[in-house]
Amino acid sequence: MVYFTSDLHLGHNAVIRMQNRPFVNAEEMNRILIDNYNSMVHQNDTVYLLGDICFRIGVDKANELIATLKGKKYLICGNHDKKYDKGLFEEIRDFMTISVNGLHISLMHYPMLSWPRSHYGSIMLHGHIHSDGSYNLSNREAGIKRYDVGVDANKYLPVSIKQIEEFMNYHD
C-alpha cells in the first residue's frame, strides 16, 4: 500500500497549542502520532512524508524518532526539516511526481495553484497549511484536485492511496 502524511511536528510542544491538538505534551503527541502511523503502515508499504516531520528537537533525536516509523519512506522536504540521516529514506527531494494505479500525483510540502498535468486529471498532495479537513472538502466541491495530507486534516493518521482515490472520485 502507498501512504501519504505531513506535518507531524514530532518534538514540537507549541504546535499542540497553535493547532489545538488533543495532546498534553510533545512526548504524548510523539507516541500517539507514531503509534497511529505504525498501526496503518506495514514494513513493505511506501510512505511519502511531505515535510515537517520534526521540529524543535536535535537531529539525533529526530533521526531516532523517524527510525521508528515503518515503511519505505520518501521525504519531500518541508520548511522545518533538518539534515536527517539519508539512510532513513529511499529518497529526499523538494518536489516529486509519481504515478500510482494510473493516477498522476504531484508531491510538495507547499500547496501549488498549478502542477504538472493538472488540466489532465492529476492531483496535488501537500501539507504545510495545517487545515482541519474543511479545506479538502472545499477543494473537492470546487473541482480542485488538491489535498492536504497533513495529520491535522486527517485525524492524526496517514492517508492511503485508496482513501485519496475514493475522496477524489466522490460525487454527491
Image: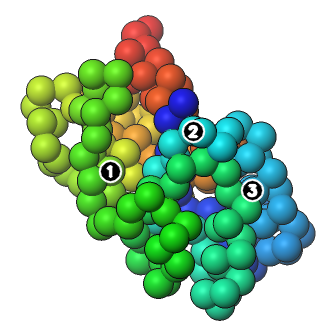
Vertical side of 118 occupied by 171: above or below: above
Does residue 145 sit above or below 57 in this rendering? above
Residue at horizontal 50%, vertical 35%?
2
Are the residues flagged by discs 3 and 1 in contact, CB closer than 8 Å? no
Residue 89 is situated, as x and y percent measured from the top left of the image, at: 49, 63
Going by the image, does 18 lie left or right of 74? right
Task: Give the residue number, with chain letter if any, for mark 2.
Answer: 45
| CB atoms of marks 3 and 2 within 8 Å | no
Residue type for callout 1:
Leu
Q: Nearer the viewer, mark 1 or mark 2?
A: 2
Question: Nearer the N terminus, badge 3 or badge 1?
Answer: 3
Q: Position of residue 79 (x, y in %)?
A: 41, 77
Residue type of the residue flagged with mark 3: Leu
Kindly identify the residue that appears in the image at 12 percent across and 27 percent down.
Answer: 120
Badge 1: how crowded within 10 Å, few (<14), some, or many (20+)? Answer: many
Q: Quadrant of the N terminus?
A: top right
**Location of mark 1 (residue):** 107
SS for dot 1: strand
7 and 91: which is toward the camera: 91
Structural crowding at the residue carrying mark 2, measured as other residues with C-alpha within 10 Å and reported as few (<14), some (14–19) or many (≥20): some
Single out the residue that lies furthest toward the top.
172
Q: Mark 3 — residue?
A: 33
Q: Quadrant of residue 103?
A: top left
Across and down, in percent, residue 50 comes to 44, 58
